[in-house]
Amino acid sequence: MSRVYLDHNATTPLRAEARAAMIAAMDVVGNPSSVHAEGRAAKGVVETARAQVAELVGCLTSQVIFTGSATEAAALAVAQKDRHGGAFAALPTEHDCLNVWSELDLPALHRADGTVGSLDVLDGQATLVAVSAANSETGIMMPDGCVVASDGDRTVVCDITQLAGKMPVLYPEGRKPAYMILSAHKIGGPKGVGAFINFTRDDPQAILKGGGQEMGRRSGTENVIGIAGFGAAAEAAHSDVAAGKWHRVEKLRNILEESLEAASEVTISVGKDSVRLPNTACLATSGWKGETQVMQMDLAGFSVSAGSACSSGKVSRSRVLEAMGYDDQTAGGAIRVSLGLDTTEDDVARFCDAWISKYQRHRARAA
C-alpha cells in the first residue's frame, strides 16, 4: 500500500504549476543583471514572480526581496535591530530560525489551554520582536487570524511561513509589521528560496554584500529557476485560499483528532479550541515518546513529525509545548500531523487505524 504524507508543515509536494514554471525558466539563458535581451528575459521571470508573491501577501512588489530561505530572511530581519533600538527578542514558541537570535528571555504568548496572551507582556523588553502569525508546531494563530503588526512600543518581525497559502494574509486595521518572512517550499514551491517583506520606508541593511542584486538589498545572482517556481506556487496558493479549498482539509483534521482522542484517554489535541491553521494537529500522548510514534508510524507508511523538525534526524521533546507550560511527559509525547490539499478521507482513516493499533500495543506493554 502506498505511503501517506502527513508532514506538510515541514515541506509540501511541488505543485504542478511550480514545476511547469521552473522547467520553462530553465530555458531562460540570461543573467537577470544583464541589460541585453537575454538578461531582460531572466529579469522578467524574476519580476513576474515578485508580483505573484506580493499578491499572495498583500504588499507592493518593491517590498519583496528574494532570499535563499525563510531562515536567511529571518537573519536579514534581525540584522536591522540597530535601526530599531538595538535589542532583538523572539518568543520561546518561535521557530528556531528566529529564536536562536533572541537576546532576551521572554514569556510565551501561547498557553496550554490554547489561548494566546497579549503582546503587552513584551513592553519595555525589546524594540524588535519576532512573533509568528501561526505557530508551526501547534497551528495556533493570533486570536483575530491576522498578521502581527508593529505599534508605538515595538517593531515586529512577523513569520508568516505557515500562514501564507493556507489562510488569507490579513492585517489588523490595515496596520503592518516592519518585516515578514516566508518560504516557497511551504506553499508547494521549491526548496531553497524564500522572501523577506520590508514594510519600512528604508531599504534593509544587507547581510550578503557583493554584486548588489535585488536592488542592493541582497547580493548574489538570483535563483531564477527557484524564484519562478516560488511565484507560480504563490499564485496557485492564493487562488486555493480564495476558493476555500482548505475548509475540506480542516474537516479531515477534526475527524483525525476526534478519532484519536476517542481511542486514548490521555491524548490531547493542543489548541483544539483556539483559532488554528486548518491543516495542523498537534497530538500529545503523555508517556508515549513522540520520537517513538514518529518511527512506528513511518514503518507503517505514514510521514509525521515530532515538533518542527528542520535538522536532519532531529527528533526531540517539543520546546514549544514546554514553553506553553506542558509537563515533560506531555511535551515529550507530542507529534505534529499536518495535512495537505491532496490528503484524502481514506488517508486519514488509514492513519487513525494505524495509530490506534500502535497505541494499543504501547498501552499493553506499559501495563
Image (spheres, grey):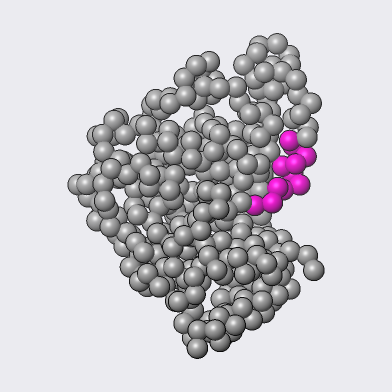
Q: Is residue 354 left or right of residue 320?
A: right
Find out whether residue 307 is within the magenta segment: no
**Name of the residue lying farthest toward the top:** 36
The residue lying toward the viewer, choosing from 293 and 166, is: 293
Q: Residue at x 66, y 73 (%)?
A: 351
Picture coordinates of residue 184, whole percent (x, y): 60, 43
Residue at position x 44%, y 50% in the image: 95
Answer whether residue 312 is visible to the viewer in this image.
yes
Query: Which residue is farthest left?
Result: 124
Asked which quadrant contains residue 205, the reply is top left
Residue 22: % across, % down: 73, 35
- What is the x, y in percent for residue 128? 31, 41
Q: Nearer the viewer, residue 210 or 57?
A: 210
Q: How many marks?
A: 0
- Can residue 55 be spotted in the picture? no
Residue 264, x across and y down, in percent: 53, 84
Residue positioned 75% across, 41% down in the render: 19
Tell me the quarter of the image containing the N terminus. bottom right
Seen at 62% across and 45% down, the residue is: 185
Q: Is residue 149 left or right of 231 when viewed as pictured?
A: left
The secondary structure that most of the magenta stretch takes on is: helix
The magenta span reads 12-22
* 336 in relation to 204, above or below: below
